[in-house]
Image (cartoon, helix red, strand yellow):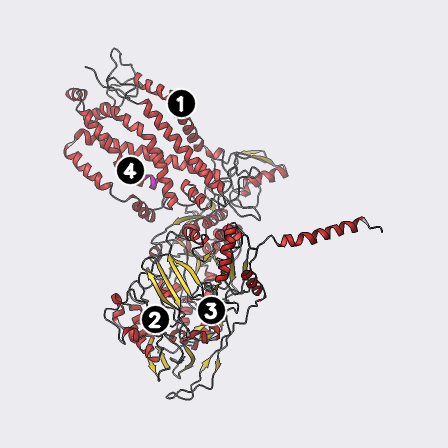
């Protein structure tokens, strides 16, 4: 009997012997089979998708350690022979470095002071501004155009905050949000969708109706209402999005499961006494995973756009959290006076969204069943 | 002849200057009507607007005691002699009126005043806050301290040509008391506060209030307006609300509704031979023949497009960034659009950060005092507001009435000083620092609060305060709540509120600070209770004399200052706008307490010059640039 295959195959390849480390009874088996290897290889050959993947991943990693590149806190301070690393440490008050104030040290000023009195030195990040502080230049009003001298490489926004800093930290918020959201909705959506498809009957019926009703709830109003009741912070937003986002993910999985469960190999598994969990986990999910995986990048870019749209409308994260939506609305309002704001945010958004779309396109091609399939 | 080198150079320079000067001067285009009016504008001087009341002994009214002293005043010409009558003014409405009625359900919309352009029985001079005649020429006070006699101007006519008589005042009372108008507030006011109106012949009425008051208060409360009895057939129709939904009542003012397209436009026309021009102060005012209002939805950005497109005549540029953006607008640079900038003293109530003392952090007076030093209002004004708004130090401004100043004008809030703020926060026990530099107390409670605000365009301003407050170890969380903010406020379900309240002619602080109101659903937003304050407030409420009331109000304001209940923010000490060149203004623009001078009905000081319109449109077509014109009046700029 010829069995279907999936990303993580539920079948031992003919003639192979289980390796010592593999537990056959585990829910999932993480073992890259030749077909998956072939798909990955195919993906790396699709240059556009592959390089986009590299680009977006590096950007993500870069944003996670953004504090090392774009931050008002110094990387290293040497003061009176002692070394300080303020980046990820607690706040050092000015008086700890012999300054006369009790708030966070202004490291840019400290650099000048220490240079003058010779008590030490300071190494600042490339962009010595964080996403919140305002740079007001005497006699001028923000927004200020890009300036190499003041290290505002993309200029400042309407209250003098560094656009690059807000862009980068805003990206971090957006991409983390998208990944969390997509991860959670796909997990919940896949499990429920698979159960609906596998069990069918009343369970399927009840959930179908429930989802139909659920999806009719006006999402924007719920966000507005919950935002008024609770502090609109990051996790609340992820929560709201997940609560209203999972249902959309169930349909495709449900339909695929319906199809798969009628196949012989499932019948065989059932005949051999496999549990529901095992059948779904080991046999069905791996075979429907392609659908999920290929739609994943598009869901990520969708989530970024949604969060940006909400922020743009003013229902997003609490000010002054750096956000793309806020930059976008500011950029549009100021496009004549400060074209660098709109230019920066539009370029960044286009780059990120297009890159993710390329990754998605690459994945779709790589997983195209017409390219690698056992059904011929 | 030997000419020194310097002399030669000087000579050449002079010749060059002589030749170049006319060329430089000619870089701007001008046209006949514009040049003529601008010359007159440059020569125009701000007149004296004062109008002290005086006793007019010549007035005798049959049936009234001869001992009555009749007062009147003779305000001078307030308009500009340059004014030309005629022309069409174009404006806009953000939404269409929900009804043309001025009382009853849905009548309290933003454009109500367009349908109620009545002159007023007597009015207040916007420069000096003195009383000036309106529909009545004289007023006199009864011996009971509750009654005012008004001698009506026999020339007053409704916009449909019928004369206004005492009968219209009697009808007004009947109208306002009628259940058919479905307006409980008016029903109540004209029963409880205005207890009676009597007529003495066609042109004298007596209006009686419920309690004895100071004279100015009495005039303020009893100067009620007439209603056209003939228009309603002498009785209040039972179906008033439905039947008069889209019928505009005749008015005594300069403009009446001529035409309308429901949902789209309103057109008003100047009343022919309007009686009001009989008064000097109305001369050269209400000059435009037609006022056209069109509905423009979609907010300020859309309105701006209509304005620069020439479809509406005026556009406000109050917000500093908006004003700055105007500098670079082509039509302004080329002088087709002029700008007007007038400083005045705005009537201002409580405005700033209102701290709820029911929130434990703000229960501590030291924290509230620390807030004075930790909130950098001045930096916000100097940066985001471009130094244009004025710093506010009190909870009331321009409370001037009956010649009496009610505000404790000497009050000043300190400048931003994180060290001084730290001292107060230390006193309150917040002397430790959290890892992010925010202060905390020994119990670990952070010096942190949530500031709610309702306008998205304040986010930038507040972000400045937030960053500055960190320097004092204070964590100010910003929460934008665009809808339902006032519900949270009334429920006292907030920690601090970035807000403002409007105010009357003088302060009404009982509602704000009396302990009786330290409960939900009242205006005591501070949840503040203090027996000493209560004493002052009770005394203020019971006091009939304005002079003594003013003293008490100042004491209350000082106490609020010492108790640090509000961190006042700023007030806007000016009105400024851009207008197409054919909208012409007096050189002084407006008066001391007046911010409606640019409005065609409330102010009516501008005029439309159709000759200039033709010239400007021609210049625009051919791309010729006038010298940009900014009329700025700084007479009342705060020092």
Query: Which numbered dot is residue B250?
Result: 2
Furthest residue toward top: A15
Q: Give the residue at mark 4.
A: A245
Type of secondary structure dominating the magenta stretch: helix
Q: Nearer the viewer, mark 2 or mark 4?
A: 2
Mark 3 vs mark 4, CA separation in Å: 62 Å
Q: Position of residue B188 (x, y in %)?
A: 30, 71
Question: Between marks 2 and 3, how big is the CA–CA gap?
Answer: 20 Å
How far, Cα to Cα, is label 2 from label 1?
78 Å
Residue contact between numbered discs 2 and 1, judged by CB atoms under 8 Å: no
Q: Secondary structure at mark 2?
A: loop
Badge 2 sits on which subunit?
B
- Point out which mark residue A47 bears: 1
Q: Nearer the viewer, residue B639 or B586?
A: B586
Residue B220 rendering spot, x and y as whole percentages: 41, 73
The range drawn in magenta is A235-239
User: How far across and down, in percent of the image, does residue B172 sit?
Assistant: 32, 75
Mark 3 vs mark 4, foreground winner is 3
Q: Chain of mark 3?
A: B
B213 or B443: which is nearer to us? Answer: B213
Q: Quick check: do tags 3 and 4 share a chain?
A: no
| Disc nearer the start of the sequence (2/3) | 2
Q: Which residue is mark 3?
A: B285
Q: Is residue B150 left or right of residue A134?
A: left
Judging from the image, what secondary structure is the residue with disc 1 in?
Answer: helix
Select label 3 or label 1 by which is in front.
3
Q: How far is disc 1 from disc 4 in space, using C-alphas?
A: 32 Å
Q: Are marks 2 and 4 on the same chain?
A: no
């Amino acid at each position: 009997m010829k069995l279907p295959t999936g990303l993580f195959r539920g079948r031992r390849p003919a003639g192979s012997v289980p390796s010592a480390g593999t537990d056959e009874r585990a829910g999932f088996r993480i073992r890259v089979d030749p077909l998956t290897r072939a798909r990955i290889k195919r993906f790396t050959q699709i240059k556009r998708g592959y390089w986009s993947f590299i680009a977006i991943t590096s950007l993500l990693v870069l944003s996670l350690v953004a504090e090392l590149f774009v931050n008002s806190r110094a990387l290293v301070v040497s003061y009176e022979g002692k070394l300080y690393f303020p980046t990820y440490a607690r706040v050092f008050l000015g008086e700890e470095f012999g300054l006369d104030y009790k708030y966070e040290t202004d490291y840019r000023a400290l650099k000048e002071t220490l240079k003058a009195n010779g008590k030490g030195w300071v190494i600042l990040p490339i962009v010595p501004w964080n996403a919140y502080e305002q740079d007001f230049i005497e006699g001028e009003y923000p927004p200020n155009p890009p300036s190499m001298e003041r290290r505002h490489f993309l200029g400042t926004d309407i209250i003098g905050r560094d656009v690059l800093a807000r862009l980068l930290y805003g990206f971090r918020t957006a991409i983390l949000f998208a990944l969390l959201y997509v991860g959670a909705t796909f997990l919940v959506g896949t499990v429920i969708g698979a159960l609906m498809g596998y069990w069918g009957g009343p369970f399927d019926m009840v959930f179908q109706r429930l989802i139909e009703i659920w999806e009719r709830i006006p999402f924007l109003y719920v966000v507005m209402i919950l935002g008024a009741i609770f502090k609109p912070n990051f996790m609340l937003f992820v929560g709201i999005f997940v609560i209203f986002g999972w249902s959309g993910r169930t349909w495709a999985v449900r339909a695929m499961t319906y199809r798969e469960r009628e196949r012989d190999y499932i019948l065989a598994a059932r005949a051999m006494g496999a549990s529901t969990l095992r059948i779904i986990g080991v046999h069905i999910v791996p075979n429907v995973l392609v659908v999920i995986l290929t739609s994943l990048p598009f869901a990520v870019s969708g989530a970024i756009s949604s969060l940006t749209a909400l922020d743009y409308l003013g229902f997003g994260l609490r000010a002054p959290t750096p956000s793309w939506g806020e930059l976008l609305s500011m950029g549009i309002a100021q496009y004549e006076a400060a074209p660098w704001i709109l230019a920066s945010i539009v370029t960044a958004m286009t780059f990120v969204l297009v890159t993710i779309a390329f990754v998605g396109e690459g994945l779709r091609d790589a997983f195209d069943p017409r390219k690698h399939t056992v059904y011929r | 002849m030997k000419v020194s080198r310097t002399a030669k150079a000087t000579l050449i320079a002079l010749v060059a200057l002589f030749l170049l000067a006319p060329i430089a001067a000619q870089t701007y285009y001008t046209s006949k009507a514009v040049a003529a009016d601008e010359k007159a504008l440059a020569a125009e001087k701000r007149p004296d607007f004062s109008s002290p009341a005086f006793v007019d002994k010549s007035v005798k009214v049959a049936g009234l005691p001869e001992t009555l002293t009749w007062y009147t005043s003779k305000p001078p010409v307030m308009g500009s002699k340059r004014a030309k009558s005629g022309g069409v003014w174009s404006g806009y409405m953000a939404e269409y009126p929900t009804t043309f009625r001025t009382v009853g359900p849905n009548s309290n919309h933003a454009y109500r005043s367009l349908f109620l352009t009545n002159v007023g029985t007597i009015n207040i001079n916007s420069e000096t806050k003195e009383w000036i005649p309106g529909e009545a020429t004289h007023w006199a006070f009864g011996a009971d301290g509750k009654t005012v006699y008004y001698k009506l101007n026999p020339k007053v006519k409704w916009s449909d040509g019928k004369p206004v008589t005492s009968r219209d005042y009697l009808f007004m009372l009947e109208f306002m008391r009628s259940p058919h108008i479905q307006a409980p507030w008016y029903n109540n006011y004209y029963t409880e506060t205005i207890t009676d109106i009597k007529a003495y012949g066609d042109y004298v009425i007596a209006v009686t209030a419920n309690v004895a008051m100071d004279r100015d208060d009495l005039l303020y409360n009893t100067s009620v307006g007439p209603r056209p009895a003939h228009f309603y057939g002498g009785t209040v129709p039972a179906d008033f609300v439905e039947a008069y939904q889209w019928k505009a009542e005749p008015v005594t003012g300069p403009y009446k509704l001529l035409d309308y397209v429901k949902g789209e436009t309103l057109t008003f026309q100047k009343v022919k031979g309007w009686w009001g021009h009989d008064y000097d102060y109305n001369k050269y005012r209400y000059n435009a023949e037609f006022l056209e209002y069109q509905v423009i939805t979609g907010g300020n950005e859309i309105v701006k497009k209509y304005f620069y497109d020439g479809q509406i005549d005026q556009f406000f540029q109050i917000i500093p960034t908006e004003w700055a953006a105007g500098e670079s607008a082509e039509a302004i640079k080329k002088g087709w659009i002029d700008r007007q900038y007038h400083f005045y003293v705005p009537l201002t109530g409580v405005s700033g950060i209102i701290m709820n003392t029911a929130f434990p952090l703000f229960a501590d007076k030291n924290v509230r005092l620390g807030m004075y030093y930790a909130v950098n209002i001045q930096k916000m004004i100097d940066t985001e507001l471009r130094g244009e708004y004025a710093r506010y130090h009190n909870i009331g401004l321009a409370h001037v009435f009956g010649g009496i100043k009610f505000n404790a004008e000497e009050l000043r809030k300190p400048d931003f000083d994180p060290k001084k703020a730290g001292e107060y926060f230390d006193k309150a026990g917040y002397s430790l620092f959290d890892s992010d530099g925010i202060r905390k107390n020994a119990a670990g409670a952070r010096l942190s609060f949530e500031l709610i605000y309702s306008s998205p365009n304040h986010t930038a301003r507040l972000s400045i305060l937030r960053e500055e407050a960190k320097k004092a170890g204070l964590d100010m969380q910003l929460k934008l709540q665009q809808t339902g903010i006032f519900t949270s406020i009334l429920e006292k379900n907030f920690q601090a509120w970035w807000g403002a309240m409007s105010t009357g002619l003088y302060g009404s602080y009982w509602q704000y600070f009396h302990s009786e109101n330290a409960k939900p659903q009242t205006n005591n937003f501070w949840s503040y209770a203090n027996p000493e304050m209560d004493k002052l407030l009770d005394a203020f409420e019971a006091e009939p004399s304005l002079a003594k009331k003013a003293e008490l109000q100042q004491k209350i304001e000082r106490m609020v200052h010492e108790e640090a209940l509000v961190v006042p923010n700023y007030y806007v000490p000016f009105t400024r706008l851009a207008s197409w060149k054919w909208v012409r203004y007096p050189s002084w623009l407006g008066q001391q307490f007046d911010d409606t001078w640019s409005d065609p009905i409330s102010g009516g000081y501008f005029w439309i010059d159709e000759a200039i319109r033709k010239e400007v449109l021609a210049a625009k077509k051919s791309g010729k640039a006038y010298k940009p014109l900014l009329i700025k009046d700084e007479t009342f700029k705060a020092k």
